[in-house]
């Protein structure tokens, strides 16, 4: 199982809660859970603020050996996985997408570590397959295009996990009623 797991964040959402949930959902287990968040989708009106907060929170993530309590993100499973993820990040950068990454600390040179990464893309269609590691692909959306965004999420063919952050009951009902995913999470991490 796998998941091109998305999270829609509308303008009514609590930004601090969103950022904590996104960071945990994307980077715990080095992004190698089948339910890990891959595509947070903030509404255009709050996207700049959410992205600025995500970039700030990313700087607080600690990378290293997971037998240390202070570490948040460990290595990926194999050297092959590391190579696939690094090639994906390089390809996205070559396509002109904005890429934010943490520098890897010195203690990670002898392992299969991948720097936690945030890539802002213009459309979910830019992703051809799931990237199984600590990589977020942020897609902005306009509220009037919510239905089209849900269609794009459903069209990925990976319907394992979906998240929604909103304080509007009508949005919860409308979005969760349309998303084709096995697990739906509202106002929490995935």
Image (cartoon, rainbow, N blue to C red):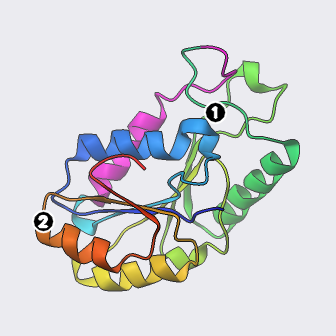
Measure the alpha-carbon separation of dots 1 and 2.
Answer: 40 Å
**Relative side of 174 to 65, left or right:** left
Q: Position of residue 89 (x, y in %)?
A: 68, 56
Q: Quadrant of residue 29?
A: top right
Q: Which tag, 1 or 2, sits closer to the chain's start?
A: 1
Label 2 residue SS: helix
Res 103 label: 1
Check if residue 55 falls in the magenta segment.
Answer: yes
Q: Is residue 11 above or below residue 151?
A: above
Q: Residues within 10 Å of mark 1 (few under 14, many from 20)?
A: few
Q: Residue at x 43, y 50 (%)?
A: 190
Seen in the picture, residue 79 relative to 172 is either above or below; the reply is above
Q: Please, which residue is most extreme toward the front here?
A: 182
For label 1, the SS is loop
Q: Which residues are magenta?
A: 47-68
The nearer-to-camera label among 1 and 2 is 2
Q: Which residue is mark 2?
A: 169
- Could you tell me residue 110's position as x and y percent? 85, 25
Q: Residue at x 37, y 68 (%)?
A: 140
Q: Quadrant of residue 149?
A: bottom left
């Amino acid at each position: 199982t796998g998941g091109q797991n998305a999270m829609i964040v509308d303008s009514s959402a609590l930004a601090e809660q969103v950022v904590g949930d996104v960071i945990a959902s994307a980077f715990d287990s080095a992004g190698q859970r089948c339910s890990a968040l891959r595509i947070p989708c903030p509404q255009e009106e709050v996207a700049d603020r959410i992205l600025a907060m995500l970039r700030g929170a990313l700087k607080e993530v600690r990378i290293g050996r997971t037998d240390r309590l202070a570490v948040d993100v460990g290595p990926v499973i194999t050297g092959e996985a590391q190579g696939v993820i690094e090639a994906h990040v390089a390809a996205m950068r070559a396509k002109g997408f904005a890429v934010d990454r943490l520098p890897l600390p010195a203690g990670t040179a002898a392992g299969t570590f991948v720097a936690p990464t945030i890539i802002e893309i213009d459309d979910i269609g830019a992703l051809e397959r799931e990237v199984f590691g600590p990589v977020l692909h942020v897609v902005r959306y306009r509220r009037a295009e919510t239905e089209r965004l849900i269609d794009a999420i459903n069209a990925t063919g990976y319907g394992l996990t979906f998240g929604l952050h909103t304080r509007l009951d009508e949005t919860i009902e409308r979005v969760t009623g349309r998303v084709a995913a096995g697990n739906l999470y509202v106002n929490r991490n995935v």
